[in-house]
Image: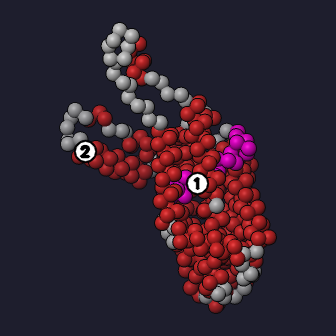
Amino acid sequence: MSTNGEFKPLSKPRISFQKFAFYFITLAVSVLIYLKFSEVRLIRDLFLRSNFFWLFGVIVTQVISYYFVALNYRDVLRVKDLEVGVRELFPVTFVIQFLNQALPSAGFSGQAFFVHYLKKFGLTVAEGIGRALLELATLYMAFGVFFVISSVMMFRNGIMGQHPEARFFIYAFAFFAVIALSWFLALQKRKRGKFARWMINKIHAYFENRRKKKNGNGDDNKDNGADHASHVAMIIDQFKETFNFGELKKRARPFWLAFFWQNMILLASVFTLYFLSFALDSKISFSVAFITFTLTKFLSMVAFVPGGLGVFEGGMTLILISFGVPAQPAFAMTLLLRAFTFWLPMPVGWILYRWYTHRYELEHPYEDLSTNSNQQ
């Protein structure tokens, strides 16, 4: 009520999108824990029965792996002529991992947060997409190195003779490697090819038809549709610009350093599995740990399942059993590896995500739109 006795309409409640996203993601995590409660309880029992000395080694290895991820981010950003310190990037890695796990979206949720986060350093959305593509490229290259080493190990140790079905992994890897190499060579062309133009037109037509159906084919809403063709073209242009051989050659040092850190991230996961076998008193050789993790990683990558859930657990357990590990310890190793890479980082990521959203609200206070409109 005003001083002259007249009632003023109440202003609309201001809803923070950042708060809404935080509570929505918290709810999603709670549902995930509820659905996986039996698995979490089993993991707790395995922890209590394991050797705590080796479990401590696993924790240290996992923390180091996140530091390697931050180093990879730093050098990928250097390829994009942006300097961000590891101290700044290290906590962000936990948030990205948390979002990818809380909202299974093939890594899109975490990357979307990171692209938005990097805006404060002046990185545009297009450049953020290019950074994500570079990160994926270094990951696939590092994994290619690991797969080749695993294949050599399998041949030298006679595993191929004992398990001829392992050749199918090599055939599948060769198939995807040829596609990736062909794509890289195609991106060296300066102009968009006929296929790229055809794909853009088809995708644009698809979105246009959806918009017309949604708007009832009305002409009044004709200008409300987004130009999806320009978005697709931007992504394709980022592909071409990011993977241009001349541009990569100019920034060879940060690119190869980013590739090196991806190798170290994968190696940390191998050591995690290796240490877990000691913690559970079911020791495996380092070569078995190396091959098992690499083949399991390959299965989860080609399965197109967010986070490799189900595929990762089942694949690793079966591969360990094929190497002579009893079923129960093989399943226990798989569950504990999943615990250290999936469950344990989640509380840290949740706390840091809340901190980042709170800081964003402080740096971008909401404007009272009703007041502004009255003033105008």
Q: Which residue is mark 2?
A: 214
Which color scheme did the rendering employ for the protein? secondary structure
- Determine if the magenta segment contains residue 89: yes
- Residue farthest to the top? 4
- Say which element carries label 2: helix
Looking at the rendering, which quadrant does residue 260 occupy? bottom right
Q: Label 1: which residue?
A: 98
Where, by quadrant of the figure, is residue 334 drawn? Answer: bottom right
- Give the magenta part as a residue range: 83-108
Q: Position of residue 109 (x, y in %)?
A: 51, 51
Quarter of the image with the C terminus in it: top left
Q: Earlier in the sequence, mark 2 or mark 1?
A: 1
Identify which residue, 211 or 259, lies in the foreground. 211
Dominant SS type (magenta): helix
Q: Please tell me whether mark 1 sits on a helix, a strand or a loop.
A: helix
- Which labelled disc corresponds to residue 146? none
Which residue does the image show at 53% across and 72% down from the upper left?
A: 38
Q: Nearer the viewer, mark 2 or mark 1?
A: 1
Q: Is residue 193 magenta?
A: no
